[in-house]
Image: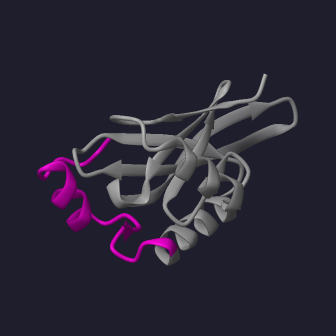
Amino acid sequence: MPRQLTPAFGLPEPLESVEQDFSQAADFGRVLVGANYFFYSKLMEIKYIPLKDIVWSYMRQEDSNLTLCCGKGTLSTYYLMTVIASGEKKKIELETRESVLAVLERLREADPRIQIGYSEEIAAQFTGGETPNT
């Protein structure tokens, strides 16, 4: 069964334009960025967000300390955080730091009005002064 394109937030967009954008989108593994939409995999669906709805995107790194038979180490997990105007956000795990940075650069190119990167000032602008936990 093919994966279904469904909106991540709100009402569906015209399916024809979503499908066309999906077929031409730049592929970053679990994430694709088209000319008008941002796509990500979730179970058996492909979720999409219109780029015009995204106001902020940044990388989140979470580190876990590990104790293994041969010593200790740190496991880093990288997430792409995407926030829309209503304040709703999506946390999408990607394989590497470089993957997240490549997606952020593509988002910057696709829609220059999207705030890219994390800072306390940007966080305050989109979260009402509260630092987001996720």
Q: Can the viewer see residue 54 in this picture?
A: no
Q: Nearer the viewer, residue 46 or 130?
A: 46
Q: Nearer the viewer, residue 96 or 20?
A: 20
Left or right: 24, with 116 as reference point: right
Quadrant the C terminus occupies: top left
Q: Nearer the viewer, residue 34 or 29?
A: 34
Q: Residue furthest left?
A: 128
- Location of residue 127 in the rendering, given as x and y in whole percent from the top left corner: 19, 49
Q: Residue at x 65, y 25 (%)?
A: 43
Way the structure is coloured: one colour
Q: Nearer the viewer, residue 105 or 8?
A: 8
- Location of residue 28 in the rendering, given as x and y in whole percent from the top left corner: 70, 57
The image shows a total of numbered marks equal to 0
- Location of residue 105 in the rendering, given as x and y in whole percent from the top left corner: 55, 73
Left or right: 14, with 119 as reference point: right
Q: Can the viewer see residue 40 in this picture?
A: yes
Q: Residue furthest right?
A: 70
Quadrant the N terminus occupies: top right
Q: Is residue 133 magenta?
A: yes
| Res. 132 image quadrant | top left
User: What stretch of residues is rendered in magenta?
Assistant: 110-134
Q: Residue at x 72, y 44 (%)?
A: 73
- Location of residue 50 in the rendering, given as x and y in whole percent from the top left corner: 42, 53
Q: Is residue 20 magenta?
A: no
Q: Is residue 5 above or below residue 115?
A: above
Q: Residue at x 39, y 77 (%)?
A: 112
Q: Is residue 122 above or below residue 11?
A: below
Q: Residue at x 25, y 65 (%)?
A: 122
Left or right: 76, with 125 as reference point: right
